[in-house]
Amino acid sequence: MTQTTNRLLDELSRLMNDAAGAAQGVKREIDAVVRHQAERILADLDLVKREEFEAVKEMARLAREENEALKARLASLEAKLGARQGGAGT
């Protein structure tokens, strides 16, 4: 009887291990399918990738800096032009 019980428990243990392994395999398959579907949906939404967003953000920052520098230069040139015109008129 003891040997039969041990063999029964061994078989039950092996069955449980096999079931756990199969469950992990199914989980991996489901994860892969869900990931693929999510990637497909995101691709259909035509979203901007993070790298592209950061690149455009940097371009905008540089353009703002250049715009500020040009404004300062224009103001300086206008001031010089105004000084010349004001001095020549008197």
Image (cartoon, rainbow, N blue to C red):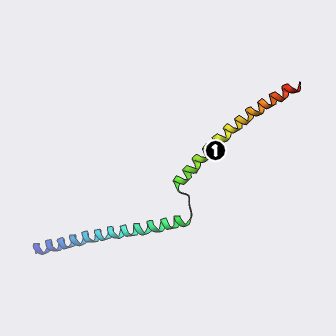
Q: Write down the residue under mark 1.
A: 63
Q: Quadrant of residue 65?
A: top right
Residue in the picture at 84% in, 29% down? 85
Marks counted in the figure total 1
Residue reaching furthest to the right: 90
Lateral position of residue 49 relative to residue 28, left or right: right
Q: Is residue 6 left or right of residue 50?
A: left
Question: Alpha-carbon neighbours of circle 1 within 10 Å: few (<14), some, or many (≥20)?
Answer: few
Mark 1 element type: helix
Query: In the image, 29: left or right of 10?
Result: right
Residue located at (56% from left, 58% from top): 48
Apparent side of residue 30 relative to residue 45 in the rendered image (left or right):
left
Q: Position of residue 3 (x, y in %)?
A: 10, 73
Q: Quadrant of the C terminus?
A: top right
Q: Quadrant of the N terminus?
A: bottom left
- Which residue is located at x 42 percent, y 69 percent? 33
Looking at the image, residue 55 lies above or below residue 80 = below
Q: Quadrant of residue 79?
A: top right
Q: Nearer the viewer, residue 26 or 41?
A: 41
Q: At which x and y percent is residue 77? A: 75, 33
In front of the other: 76 or 29: 76
Give the camera-side residue of 27 and 89.
89
Q: Hey, what amino acid is under mark 1?
A: Ala
Image coords of residue 30 (percent x, y): 40, 69
